[in-house]
Amino acid sequence: MSTAAPGAWPRDHYLSSGWSLRAWLLTTDHKRIAWLYTASITFFFFLGGLAALLVRLELMTPVGDLLSADFYNQMFSFHGIVMVWFFLIPSIPATLGNFLIPIMVGAKDLAFPRLNLLSWYIYTVGGMVVLIALLTGGVDTGWTFYVPLSTLFSNSAVVWAVAGVFVVGFSTILTGLNFIVTIHTMRTRGLTWFRLPLFVWANYAVSLVMVLATPVLAMTLLLIAMERLLGIGIFDPALGGDPLLFQHLFWFYSHPAVYIMILPAFGVVSELITCFARKPVFGYHGMVISLMTITVLGFLVWGHHMFTSGLSLYAGIVFSLFSFLVAIPSAMKTFNWTATLYKGRITFHAPMIYALSFIGLFTIGGLTGIIVASLAADVHLHDTYFVVAHFHYVMVGAAVTAYLGGLHFWWPKMTGRMYPEIWARVAAVTLFIGFNLTFFPQFLLGYLGMPRRYQTYPEDFQILNVMSSLGAGVLAVGYLLPMLYLLWSLRWGAKAPGNPWGAKGLEWETSSPPPAHNFHQPKRVTEPPYAYHEYDD
């Protein structure tokens, strides 16, 4: 690949015409659809974050003196439903993936442009249905919709929430299908499978999971609605059903969903580490193999969520073993990123700070995942704040940090504008400090026995809860700052060159912002990925 990059701001870039609302709402340009997704998930992110802040404010005192018990249940449920289904799962694939994958493979667009626009409309409809659930009584079942609470005992708007998540699943499937077909059939000349950027490989792996696993969730949610509305005995033992069947079906999807959230983050961090270390990724083929290995093993570990449900001891041992095995390819990536940094010419731009934060947070999340995958330890820690902290270190700390790192890295390419670097560095450090102050005390709370989702708790736990709530305030600042200065940069930021980082990859061989069809001339790839050399600036 050529290291030369065209000048910035061509006259025919994709943002240069068609600014009417109709032009945006009917666009089939993958880059504009990526922006539609970005605006939508940002809205849901701050909506879910507001619910989380209310929960943390309530937990600053050991008695329920801010929110009613019902409203508290609705807030943590709404936080989980919005953050998991409407932010974490689509965050990187629907935004950065939508924008970059066609450019990275040298294509003009995704394989099915109209299907791509339809997926955003489906996502939006699903989100509106969930908002209806919030406005018509809320949901108090948690994001997992466990039966029999969701089918028999809850008086909240469970059916509306289930319907919203059911609808948004079709958006996920269509996006995954589009990525798979594009990567298989639309790669430019010379771009063989093992010349693909790791970001493309990660989104390819996650697309397989989305297409194969999401229908199981859709069927499970449909069964909840059928039992609740029609009284059909599926999970209710009094009607001949089995409540544990729901857990098996739900976690068969929802543990692979963890990898839907984190696999794209692996791809982002790989791009950032190699660029700002000025070295090829250490063990590129091993990284690809580990991504695909996680994709397969992710379907075999759902039972470690059910160790306290009466699951067979022998089944528990098997699930525990597979949970240990899936940690191996995850650890491989951490090792390879560290080896890539070794003797690299590292520059600490904001995207690199986010990438290094990701490695630290993901390592803590991964190591504590091994603890809760251990049969004996999980009996004590199950349904405590230890699990909450572990989940957030992986899903929020690592995945959101990677998303923000990728957004900063490709922001000049997407917008043609540079952001204020010093503020970006401040935001990255603030987020890292705020996140650890928020969630590390929760490991201690869980170890000491505080159950999650409780509004009240013994006074002995108050100091750790106060620390966690104060950390949530710092974390909120870390999330608000990027929104402010990135929006500012759209109007007042300096114009970006075609390749401000001196990075490798086809996306850096087109202008900033890219033309409507990405490239003026077809590209041909002649080098391996990440061909950084000692003389590169």
Image (cartoon, rainbow, N blue to C red):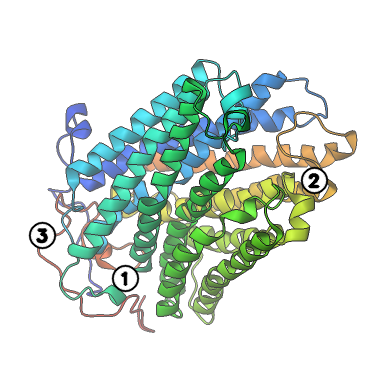
Q: Which residue is mark 2?
A: 445
The amino acid type, in three-letter code, at marker 3 is His
For the question of whether residue 182 can be seen, the reply is yes
The quadrant in which the N terminus is found is bottom left
3D distance between C-alphas at marks 1 and 2: 45 Å
Residue reaching furthest bottom?
534
Q: Which residue is mark 1?
A: 504
Q: Is residue 510 left or right of residue 80?
A: left
Q: Is residue 181 left or right of residue 161?
A: left
The amino acid type, in three-letter code, at marker 2 is Leu
Task: Mark 2 or mark 3: name the one nearer the start of the chain.
Answer: 2
Task: Mark 1 or mark 2: name the one nearer the start of the chain.
Answer: 2
Which label number is shown at residue 520? 3
Which label number is shown at residue 408? none
Residue reaching furthest top?
136
Question: Is residue 363 depicted above or below 138 in this figure?
Answer: below
